[in-house]
Amino acid sequence: MTLLVPSDLYNRWFSTPVSTPHINVDYAVMNELMKKLPKGYVFPDPASMAIMNSKD
């Protein structure tokens, strides 16, 4: 049985979260993925964003 939950539960993975309450994701799959990500993971990571946004 698949348990679907609101995707907004995983917004902490994104440096600029966007609310998408109409999208549901598989709870088991997302939590397994969360276990494999480094602590404090965000996408895109702040260091990469700083480089991409620099005007140098």
Image: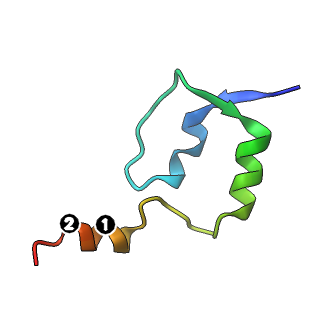
Quarter of the image with the N terminus in it = top right
* 44 shown above or below 24: below
Left or right of 24: which side holds 26?
right
55 relative to 24, above or below: below
Q: Answer with the quarter of the image where residue 45 lies.
A: bottom left
Foreground: 9 or 35?
35
Disc 2 residue crowd, few under 14, some 14–19, many 20+, Cα 10 Å: few
The amino acid on which the numbered mark 1 sits, given as a three-letter code, is: Met
Residue at point 37%, 50% (across, down): 16
Quadrant of the rendered image containing residue 5? top right
Placement of 41 over or under 51, stated as above or below: above
Horizontal and vertical percent position of residue 22 = 52, 21
Q: Which disc, if any, is residue 49? A: 1
* Residue 36 in the image, given as x and y percentages of width and height: 72, 63
Quarter containing the C terminus: bottom left
Q: In the rendered view, does 27 fall on the left or right side of 16?
A: right
**Mark 1 falls on what kind of element?**
helix
Q: What residue appears at the point 41 percent right and 56 percent down from the top-left corner? A: 15
Gap in angstroms between the C-alphas marked 2 and 1:
6 Å
Q: Which residue is mark 2?
A: 53
Looking at the rendered structure, the secondary structure element under dot 2 is: helix
Q: Are marks 2 and 1 in contact (CB under 8 Å)?
A: yes
